[in-house]
Image: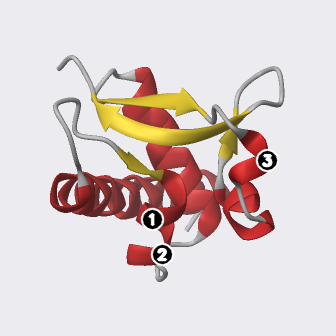
């Protein structure tokens, strides 16, 4: 097996794992969503899916956001966040914690 074949297989395995993780994130979001915009928080999603590694969760959530399947919103009142919740959030390019997850436009 060549290094290229090995790398391609790892990439393919990661794509399958990511697809499964994305599906689980979407299913969990649908169960947890509240209100007219179907909102929950990233910490709540993480707590419901503890077996998904953080890097995989973050990568999948970011991809769902970029594809506009889900929207991520900034935390409004930072002082209300516990340290654990703050650490569970993603951050945007400015370093602002992204806390809320809502249904996207797709």
The tag on residue 80 is none
Among the 4 quarters of the image, the one containing residue 65: top left
- Give the foreground label among 1 and 3: 3
Q: How many marks?
A: 3
Q: CA distance from mark 3 to mark 2?
A: 21 Å
Spot occupied by residue 21 in the image (x, y as percentages of width and height): 35, 62
Q: Which residue is mark 2?
A: 47
Is 71 rendered above or below residue 44? above
User: In percent of the image, x 82 and y 21: which residue is there?
Assistant: 94
Spot occupied by residue 19 in the image (x, y as percentages of width and height): 30, 53
Q: Which residue is mark 3?
A: 79
Among the 4 quarters of the image, the one containing residue 76: top right
- Give the foreground label among 3 and 2: 3
**Quadrant in which the C terminus is drawn:** top left
**Labelled pair 2, 1 in contact (Cβ < 8 Å):** yes
| Secondary element at tag 1 | helix
| Secondary element at tag 2 | helix
**Quadrant in which the N terminus is drawn:** bottom right
| Secondary element at tag 3 | helix
The answer to which of marks 1 and 3 sits earlier in the sequence is 1
Res 30 visible: yes
Is 68 rendered above or below residue 38? above
Spot occupied by residue 87 in the image (x, y as percentages of width and height): 76, 60
The tag on residue 44 is 1
Residue at the far bottom: name it.
51
User: In percent of the image, x 66 and y 60: which residue is there?
Assistant: 88
Sort mark 3 into few (<14), some (14-19) or many (20+) by Cα contacts within 10 Å.
few
Is residue 64 toward the left or the right of residue 98 in the image?
Answer: left
Is residue 55 toward the left or the right of residue 101 in the image?
Answer: right
Sort mark 1 into few (<14), some (14-19) or many (20+) by Cα contacts within 10 Å.
some
Q: CA distance from mark 1 to mark 3?
A: 18 Å
């Amino acid at each position: 097996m060549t290094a290229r074949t090995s790398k391609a297989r790892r990439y393919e395995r990661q794509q399958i794992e990511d697809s499964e993780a994305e599906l689980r994130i979407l299913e969990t979001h649908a169960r947890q969503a509240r209100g007219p915009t179907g909102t929950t928080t990233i910490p709540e999603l993480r707590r419901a899916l503890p077996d998904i590694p953080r890097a995989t969760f973050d990568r999948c959530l970011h991809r769902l956001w970029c594809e506009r399947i889900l929207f991520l919103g900034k935390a409004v009142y930072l002082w209300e966040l516990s340290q654990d919740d703050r650490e569970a959030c993603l951050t945007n390019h400015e370093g602002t914690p992204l806390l809320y997850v809502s249904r996207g436009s797709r």
